[in-house]
Amino acid sequence: MATEKKVTAIKNTPKHLLGIQNLSVLEAKEILTEAKSFIKLNRGSSKKLDVLRGKTQINLFFEPSTRTQSSFDLAGKRLGADVMTMNMGNSALKKGETLIDTAMTLNAMHPDIIVIRHQDSGAPNLLSQKVNCTVINAGDGRREHPTQALLDALTIINRKGNIEGLKIAICGDILHSRVARSNIYLMNMLGAEVNVIAPKTLMPKGIDNLGVKSFTDMKKGLDGCDIVMMLRLQNERMQGSFLPSKREYYEFFGLTPEKLKFAKKDALLMHPGPMNRGVEIDTKLADDINVSLVKEQVELGVAVRMACLKLYCK
Amino acid sequence: MKEKILTNVRIIDPSQKMDEIGNIVIDEKGKIKSIGKKSGTSKSAEKIDLKGLVAIPGLVDMKAFVGEPGFEYKENFRTLSQAALAGGVTSIVTMPNTKPVIDNVSMVDFIIRRGRDKAKVNLFPCASITRQMEGNQMTEFGLLKARGIIGFSDVNKTIQNSELMSRIMNYASDIDVLIMQHAEDYELAKNSCINQGEVATRLGLQGVSDIAEKIIIERDLSLLSEFPCRYHINQISSKNSLNVIKKNKSNGIKFSTGVSINNLSLNQNDIGEFRTFLKLSPPLRSEEDRLSLIEGIKNDLINVIVSDHIPEDEESKRLPFAQAATGSIGIETLLSLSLELYHNESLPLEKIIKCLTINPAKILKIDKGSLKEGSDADICIFDLEKPWVVKAEELKSKSKNTAIENRKLQGKVKMTLLQGEVVYSN
């Protein structure tokens, strides 16, 4: 990172982490610096701190999640917080009213942090208006997934030393991806150049105004890139409504060793998971430790979430 | 009632191309006896001096929702009429999307009786175009018309079936009824809650392209050239739609077009971070679209400004944006917000008033929206310059979902007369 000096941009409590859009550069850098200090701790044998001792963290997941949920779970526990995870399921009946009702109920139990994952864009914003504790967004609809972008940034910094001046390609279902959006904001903020690559039906309108260049051709989009981020393509979108077929998608947008050659020689590969092997990514490539940062992303995810919990729950 | 004279008032009445300072004499029956600078006076009459104020025909709002029956907790006849009169609106076209839907004669009788007992405004009820507003079978246009239905609308739903639409037009043309269409293609608009574009992309919401609106307008106007009937497009929201309208008007197709004051005064950026009160249908679009709609009024491509008054309780708005109810209230602020377009020099005053009075009255074929001698003395009197701030809690509607909370406006209704009686004053 450019500045190793300790910056303290995050001051007021309770403050919420709702999206990268609401962060300043200083705030983002502070989180990353803080997260760095946790990487070693997480690799050591004694992982427990008491920074959040006495604090209560509730993970409120309205959408199923494996890695984000377990990552937040571990992060809270390692910092000494009491962590409770609630899986709210996906039933339509539980939508909406339950969010506000649940918020009020939980609020009465005086949590210090609520981590929320919700299928509706803006749900964490709504929640944050109703509770008086810190709200951390663990993914809302197709809007933002800030901790994913932060862990991606940390992973890149860890390998490349810096983000400024890098060229980063994000490929796949940009339209439905909160990971893409958060990464676009964060990578831009940290001085990278961002390309997005997707078939036209999966490219959102107005994306160019977000400060990216958009491509429909992997060869052009990957040209000169240091980092290639692949996105998950959901099954139901491959059967004729957005795309003709799985194999057509793989042919043109699946990342293969051949296509990776369009990028820089030392280009690295990232994926927020879970991967569809053989759909958006070649299975060998995904496991190639010289190229793939996927495992590192998961590892650093815990460190980033620890940093967020610590900084936002002062 | 005693004879009344309103004196020294600036009278703007586009129906008789009048803009002058003068008097309005109202006879014992609540009709206009004489009007203008040459208007006479009589000793026995009650005098009301309105120096510095403006008098216009009471507004005709072509699209408002009254919660009765079925949604009394959102709005009722009493609260709607209070809100309307405070906004200078004396004639309201009410929408049929109540529970049950107004799609049969017995419902019409109920609505008319109830409105007469509880409301202090002129109510002109609409019935649905199709039964249950399901878009499958047409309602009894002829029978409903005979019972006092003024027009037909499926409100925020669109007749998707082109064959049915052509038959509706064909049938309607013979019995002279007004068909009002909400233009939106369902498949293109599926799951959408906001205009397609950068704002939708940033907020992560499903957007709808203006093509969804344009495609229905194009279809309907093609059908209309084959089956000319009284056809009105409820609300348009985009430049693209306007271009289609322009083309068809110059080809001699006859129809009329409305726009919501919201689409004239706000754009998609006002939604900010998920302000659900600004979730509207048609959605707020780009600034370019907004400006083009103003041009549309200037060029007479758009004839009517409506409030699109949709009261919604707090609970149905306090949800994630995609799930929140659509619509905002606006009947009370219709005139003031329209006057903003005069104060910021977007439109001439006379044009604005025309779109709020005589134009809708003509489309509806009702004897309103004019202060000609002999017509009902439904009059809106306002202070053109008075500044005020919109505060939801001060509005008279039962629901407080205004899209323009805290907006600073200039121009406020001072007094409203209905058939010569002062029914509102502040």
Image: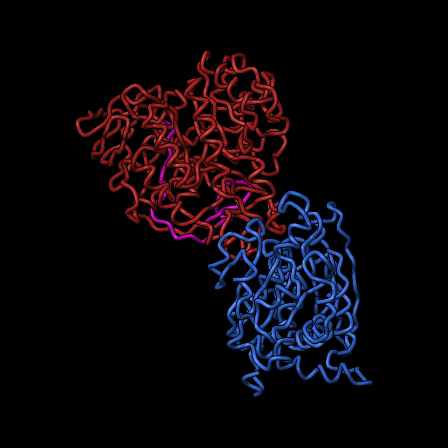
Residue placed most toward the observer, A99 or A271:
A271
As drawn, B277 above or below A299: above
Residue placed most toward the observer, B207 or B369:
B207
Q: Position of residue B9 (x, y in %)?
A: 25, 36
- Which shade of the palette goes to chain B? red
Colouring: by chain
Residue A132 appears in the figure: no
| Residue in the image at 46% along x and 22% along y | B223
Chain letter for the part of the structure drawn in blue:
A
Residue B209 appears in the figure: yes
Where, quadrant-wise, is the C terminus of chain A in this rendering? Answer: bottom right
Snapshot quadrant of residue A260: bottom right
Q: Is residue A118 magenta?
A: no
Q: Is residue B31 left or right of residue B145?
A: left
Q: Is residue B131 left or right of residue B267?
A: right
Task: Please identify the residue farthest to the left as the structure is shown.
Answer: B38
Q: Position of residue A87 (x, y in %)?
A: 78, 58
| Residue in the image at 57% along x and 25% along y | B161
As drawn, A241 above or below A281: above
| Residue in the image at 71% along x and 82% along y | A38
Q: Which residues are magenta?
A: B392-421
Task: Please identify the residue farthest to the right as the structure is shown.
Answer: A45
| Residue in the image at 18% along x and 30% along y | B37
